[in-house]
Image (tube, grey):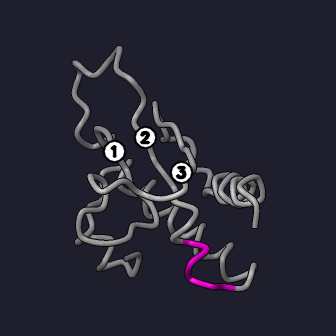
Amino acid sequence: MTRTEFEELVDAALDELPPDIAAKIDNVAVVVENRPTREQAPHGTLLGLYEGVSLADRGVDYFGVMPDRITIFMEPHLAMGLREHDLRAEIRTTVLHEMAHHMGIDDERLHELGWD
């Protein structure tokens, strides 16, 4: 799969976000990178990463800041060896997981919801 094809799957996952979630997204950029750096994933492989100040943690003094960043990592997804349909579903899950972090939902709650 090419980088362009992978990016199109990420874009499709973003387009499929539920309207109530999409309406809340604020000041966040979604990018695709080949793989995480050692600093981003010191203990293993990541499929995605949210970096920023979640919506739940933003106060009245939150303004004029660089956008939060959601990175979706291509190579770890492709290394799973999934068929395109299953890869599409995995990318969607990763995008939703990282968007949940943007909303302020932590890993413990995501685990409870079955999104880990």
Which element type, helix, strand or loop, lies under badge 1?
strand
Q: CA distance from mark 2 to mark 3?
A: 12 Å
Which element type, helix, strand or loop, lies under badge 2?
strand
Q: Residue at x 46, y 66 (%)?
A: 47
Q: Is residue 78 left or right of residue 58?
A: right
Q: Position of residue 11 (x, y in %)?
A: 69, 52
Question: Which contiguous range is marked in magenta?
Answer: 77-82
Q: CA distance from mark 1 to mark 3?
A: 14 Å
Q: Which residue is mark 3?
A: 33
Which element type, helix, strand or loop, lies under badge 3?
strand
Q: Nearer the viewer, residue 84 or 44?
A: 44
Q: Which residue is mark 2?
A: 69
Q: Position of residue 5 (x, y in %)?
A: 77, 59
> Does 106 appear above or below 81?
above
Q: Main SS type for the magenta part?
A: loop
Q: Residue at x 71, y 55 (%)?
A: 3
- Tell me, yes or no, whether the two marked residues, 1 and 3, touch with CB atoms within 8 Å: no
Which residue type carries mark 1? Glu
Q: Which residue is mark 1?
A: 51
Which residue type carries mark 3? Glu
Q: Is residue 112 left or right of residue 75?
A: left
Q: Position of residue 12 (x, y in %)?
A: 72, 57
